[in-house]
Image: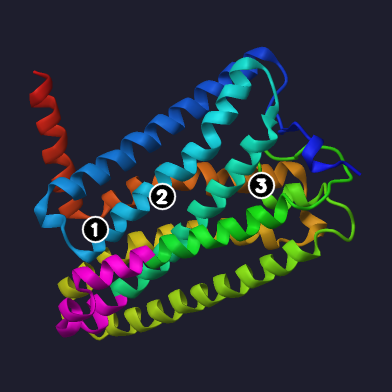
């Protein structure tokens, strides 16, 4: 048994061993990271600066972009640094910080996506009461509740995970510190407390999932009752980006953590975790801007303003 107080570091999974491929991995991750930074920062700036976008939908989108920035910044820079310096090590405290921030941001993002589903439900199913239900104070309270719940969830899981004694070394089969991978190193009977915490989180997550599904069933039922084709198209344009983001996020997270052990493998775990920890934060700005004319117009104005300032 390893006493956690004497464990200095963990060893992360290396994508490749050859030096040339390590530099290629660094370059690819750098490109994805810069694209994610650019996309999310543009959305945050556009929403903050354009008064036409000061609505509940874009307020929650701003929160989502902040969370995506944090999520990809928690995992990717360390992986890039390890490839650049040809190492696999991450300190014990660094691993704990990574677990806390990643769990915090991921939990909060799921809560924000749930609130965004409710926002779309109210906008389409109860349009006459939208201004009353989704007032600025109510939106701030819902966002604050999402961030607070994510913080408490991360605090609970991080404290439980890193209080567990480890019996199976310090090698993690993942490119970042992830709770399921750390639990694989724990002693056979010592992880039950964290298992119960995971069960509670799964139950609350399932509740959010059911809420999102029920909201969209009612949304699509209401949209199909709209007599004009133009009205239906506008309603679908409001909902489809959010539905695409939710589908990518939920499907990859569920598959990563609830897939049958019979199909589990380090390569598959790596691909799925890459999808929800790296790809999702990078493509979310693209998904939201593709079918949203207001956001595209605001981004064009922002880019034109930035180009004029450089000239």
Q: Which of marks 3 and 2 is nearer the N terminus?
A: 2
Residue 84 picture quarter: top right
Q: Is residue 279 above or below residue 20?
A: below
Quadrant containing the N terminus is top right
Q: Where is residue 263 in the image (x, y as percent from the top left)?
A: 78, 55
Tag 2 residue: 67
- Please report the residue visible at 34 percent of the width from the left and 46 percent of the height from the top: 285
Using the image, tell me which numbered label, if any, was put on residue 190: none
Crowdedness of circle 1 by 10 Å Cα count: few (<14), some, many (20+)? some
Q: Which of marks 1 and 3 is nearer the N terminus?
A: 1
Quadrant containing the C terminus is top left
- Please report the residue visible at 34 percent of the width from the left and 64 percent of the height from the top: 143
The alpha-carbon separation of the residues under discs 1 and 3 comes to: 31 Å
Q: Give the range drawn in magenta.
A: 121-144
Tag 3 residue: 178
Q: Is residue 90 left or right of residue 288?
A: right
Q: Which of marks 1 and 2 is nearer the N terminus?
A: 1
Tag 1 residue: 58
């Amino acid at each position: 048994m390893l006493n956690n107080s004497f464990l200095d570091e963990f060893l992360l999974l290396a994508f490749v061993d050859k030096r040339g491929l390590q530099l290629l991995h660094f370059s690819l991750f750098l490109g994805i990271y810069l694209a994610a930074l650019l996309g999310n920062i543009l959305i945050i700036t556009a929403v903050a600066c354009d008064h036409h976008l000061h609505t509940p939908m874009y307020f929650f989108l701003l929160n989502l972009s902040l969370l995506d920035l944090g999520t990809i910044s928690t995992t990717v820079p360390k992986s890039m640094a390890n490839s650049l310096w040809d190492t696999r090590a991450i300190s014990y405290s660094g691993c704990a910080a990574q677990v806390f921030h990643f769990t915090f941001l991921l939990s909060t993002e799921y809560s924000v996506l749930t609130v965004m589903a409710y926002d779309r439900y109210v906008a389409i199913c109860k349009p006459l009461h939208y201004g009353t239900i989704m007032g600025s104070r109510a939106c701030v309270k819902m966002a604050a509740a999402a961030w607070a719940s994510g913080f408490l969830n991360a605090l609970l899981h991080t404290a439980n995970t890193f209080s567990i004694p480890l019996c199976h070394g310090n090698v993690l089969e993942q490119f970042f510190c992830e709770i399921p991978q750390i639990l694989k190193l724990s002693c056979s009977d010592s992880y039950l407390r964290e298992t119960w915490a995971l069960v509670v989180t799964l139950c609350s997550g399932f509740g959010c999932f059911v809420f999102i599904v029920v909201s969209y069933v009612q949304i699509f039922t209401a949209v199909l009752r709209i007599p004009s084709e133009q009205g239906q198209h506008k309603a679908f344009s409001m909902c489809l980006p959010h539905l695409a983001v939710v589908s990518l996020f939920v499907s990859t997270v569920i598959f990563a953590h609830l897939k049958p052990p019979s199909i589990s493998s380090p390569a598959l775990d790596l691909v799925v975790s890459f999808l929800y920890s790296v790809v999702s934060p990078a493509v979310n700005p693209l998904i939201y801007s593709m079918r949203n004319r207001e956001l595209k117009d605001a981004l064009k104005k922002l880019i034109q303003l930035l180009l004029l300032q450089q000239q």
